[in-house]
Structures are given as C-alpha cells and as structure tokens.
Image (cartoon, rainbow, N blue to C red):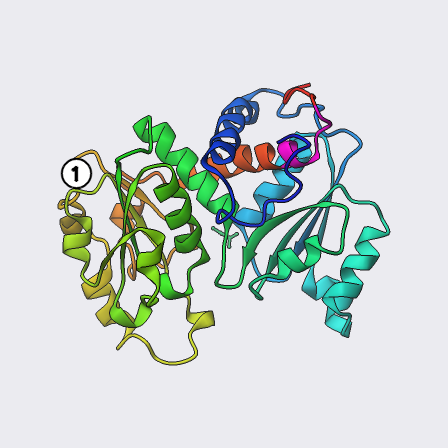
C-alpha cells in the first residue's frame, strides 16, 4: 500500500495482509491523539473531501479529525448544504469535486455501490464510509483494532454479532474481516432480520440470543435500522428488547472476560441495557477512540507519497 492501493471500497476484496497493514499502521497513529500537540505533518498539502449523503456522528467527525491530525486540508460536504439538494446528479457532483483536485474522497451514501461508482470517475482515492446495506469497511477495521487491543489477537476468538443483521453493513464487513483473520463469528437475529445468504460468510447463524452469547469472547450489539425497514419485521420494540436485548443476566453467559461492543448509535433499553453499555466490560468508547487512529491509517495509506513515513 502507500501508493499501491488506491481505494478502500470494502473488506470483500481486501487480503488479510492488507487488513493487518491497516491495523498495524493504526497502532503507529494511536498515540498521536494523546500527545500534547495532536498533529503530525504527514499529509501537508493534501486535500480530503468528506462527502456524506447520510447522517453520521462518529464516522464523519473521526475522518475530519483524522485528516486534520495528519495536517491535510479537510472539506466537509453534506447533502443539505450541497447542490445535490437542487437536483444535481452524483456524477456531476463528482466531476465538479474532481476539478478541484482532491487527494481522497470519503463517501457515505444510502445506495450500495455509490463509492465504487465514484471511484470510476475520479483520480482521487475513494474511501467507503458506509454504502447502503453493503459495507462499512473502516468500522470493521476499527472494531478489529479494538478487539486486538483488548484480547491481543483475533484468531480463534468467538465473536457474537446480534441485531438487525439483514440491514447492517457493519455486520457484513465485520463478518468478512473477522473470519478472514481467523475469528469464529456467530450472527444472531430474529429470522425476519437474518439474510438467507449469511452462511456464505463462514459464520454460524442463531435465532436466539442465549445460545449465541454462550462462551463468547466478544459480544457486538447492533441497533434495529428502522429507517431501512420497509415492513414490520419485529412484533414490537418492547418484545425485541425482551428477547434480543443484552442485559447483565444475558452477558453472564459469555466468557467472564468478554468485551461488549456497539458501533453506535445505540438505542439504550432496546438492543442493549444502559448498565451493560456503561459497564466495566464495555469497550464502546474505545471503539470511537480507535476510529480516529484507524482513519488516520487509511488516509495515510491512500494519500501519502510512496516511501513516506507515517509520522513525518
Ligand atoms: N458507527 C457509525 O457509522 O456511526 P455514525 O453513523 O455516527 O457514523
């Protein structure tokens, strides 16, 4: 990489050695965020555009902070303040941004494949910050980084991912990444929220939370994506919380040193109880902290000059 990989569009086509390089590079950047001066000159003179067509708190903010900590010029564009709201097409938007010579375009879009389309029409590196139901590769990278820091390794860990699997790009990217690095992944959801093709990812499928959590090293909870549901797929939120919510009694079925994860945003009292989310086993805010280091690594590996060292 660092010249050899142009885009980060998904985990699907990313070999294990590239995943490990992203994670190892993020380790180099992790300490920058706790220095007195939280900035390195690595991407001075480079331009990063954050192009978000969907709402975001963590991803957008951490890409902005990551770019700024690398000394890049960072520009944020959201649909409500862009000419997309006046009817401009995605292609015209990209052509206009391309004319301003960005080095990296970070894009979140409700359509699966939008980042791939943009990558075909720009010389800039393109990072997928979440596309429809498809992938969220930097979330999977930061999740793997957080697990590796907590457990020391990923191979052979039992990772349970529970929630709205059918509509979750986070579940898809994590299943791809974690199995590629040797973890044993279980996915759990009501049958109505489980895609039929999930076994092709090399995961075990559960429709009951207790057996899915039994003996797990990592329990990752996902929210119901109400904005993507086209029909009623759960009887009620209350019923879902009772049968698929992670509370202390349910967490007791995991390993005693199991960690609890959530990519956010959380619906407290639905997929996760507040005392678990805020409890001693939770690494949810560690995930957010990791997000900055991982996104610094992604921007560095896509935009730095060949042979340039990470911190100079
Ligand atoms: N995890 C995640 O993608 O959060 P945001 O939607 O806030 O970016």
Q: Residue at x 64, y 54 (%)?
A: 107
Secondary structure found at label 1: loop
Q: Which residues are magenta?
A: 299-306
Residue 277's x, y, as percent? Answer: 31, 47
Q: Horizontally, is 27 left or right of 87 in the view? A: left
Find out if the beta carbon at label 1 lies less than 8 Å from the nearest ligand 1 atom. Answer: no
Q: Please tell me which residue lies in front, 233 or 62.
A: 233
Q: Residue at x 18, y 61 (%)?
A: 208
User: How many numbered discs sit on the rendered protein?
Assistant: 1
Q: Horizontally, is 9 left or right of 73 in the view? A: left
- Residue 243: quarter of image: bottom left
Tell me if I can see residue 268 in this picture.
no
Residue 299's x, y, as percent? Answer: 64, 36
Relative to 19, say whether 29 is above or below.
above
Membership of 152 in magenta stretch:
no
Tell me the quarter of the image containing the N terminus.
top right
Residue 109's x, y, as percent? Answer: 60, 61
Q: Please tell me which residue lies in front, 183 or 236.
A: 183
Q: Residue at x 29, y 72 (%)?
A: 192
Relative to 225, say whether 187 is above or below.
above
Tell me if I can see residue 176 in this picture.
yes
Q: Residue at x 73, y 71 (%)?
A: 85
Relative to 47, say whether 212 is above or below.
below
Q: Horizontally, is 20 left or right of 87 in the view? A: left
Q: Please tell me which residue lies in front, 20 or 99.
A: 20
- Residue 118: quarter of image: bottom right
Q: Which residue is mark 1?
A: 255
Tell me the quarter of the image containing the C terminus.
top right
Relative to 71, say whether 187 is above or below.
below
- Residue 179: quarter of image: top left
């Amino acid at each position: 990489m660092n010249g050899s990989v142009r885009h980060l569009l998904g985990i699907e086509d990313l070999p294990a050695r590239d995943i490990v390089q992203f994670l190892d590079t993020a380790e180099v950047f992790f300490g920058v965020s706790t220095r007195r001066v939280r900035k390195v000159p690595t991407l001075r003179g480079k331009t990063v555009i954050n192009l978000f067509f969907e709402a975001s708190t963590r991803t957008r903010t951490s890409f902005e902070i990551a770019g700024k900590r690398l000394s890049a010029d960072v520009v944020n564009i959201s649909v409500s303040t862009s000419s997309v709201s006046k009817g401009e097409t995605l292609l015209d938007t990209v052509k206009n941004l391309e004319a301003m010579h960005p080095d990296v375009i970070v894009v979140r879009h409700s359509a699966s494949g939008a980042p791939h389309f943009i990558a075909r029409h720009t010389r800039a590196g393109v990072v997928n910050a979440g596309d429809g139901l498809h992938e969220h590769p930097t979330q999977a990278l930061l999740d793997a980084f957080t697990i590796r820091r907590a457990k020391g390794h990923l191979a052979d860990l039992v990772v349970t991912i529970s929630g709205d699997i059918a509509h979750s790009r986070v579940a898809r990217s994590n299943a791809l990444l974690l199995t590629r690095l040797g973890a044993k992944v279980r996915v759990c959801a009501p049958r109505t929220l489980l895609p039929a093709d999930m076994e092709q990812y090399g995961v075990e499928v559960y429709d009951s939370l207790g057996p899915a959590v039994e003996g797990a090293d990592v329990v990752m909870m996902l929210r119901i994506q109400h904005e993507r549901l086209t029909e009623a797929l759960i009887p009620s939120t209350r019923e879902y919380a009772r049968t698929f919510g992670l509370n202390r009694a349910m967490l007791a079925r995991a390993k005693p040193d199991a960690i609890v994860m959530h990519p956010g945003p959380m619906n407290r009292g639905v997929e996760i109880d507040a005392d678990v989310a805020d409890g001693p086993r939770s690494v949810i805010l560690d995930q957010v902290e990791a997000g900055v280091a991982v996104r610094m690594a992604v921007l560095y590996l896509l935009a730095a000059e060949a042979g340039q060292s990470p911190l100079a």
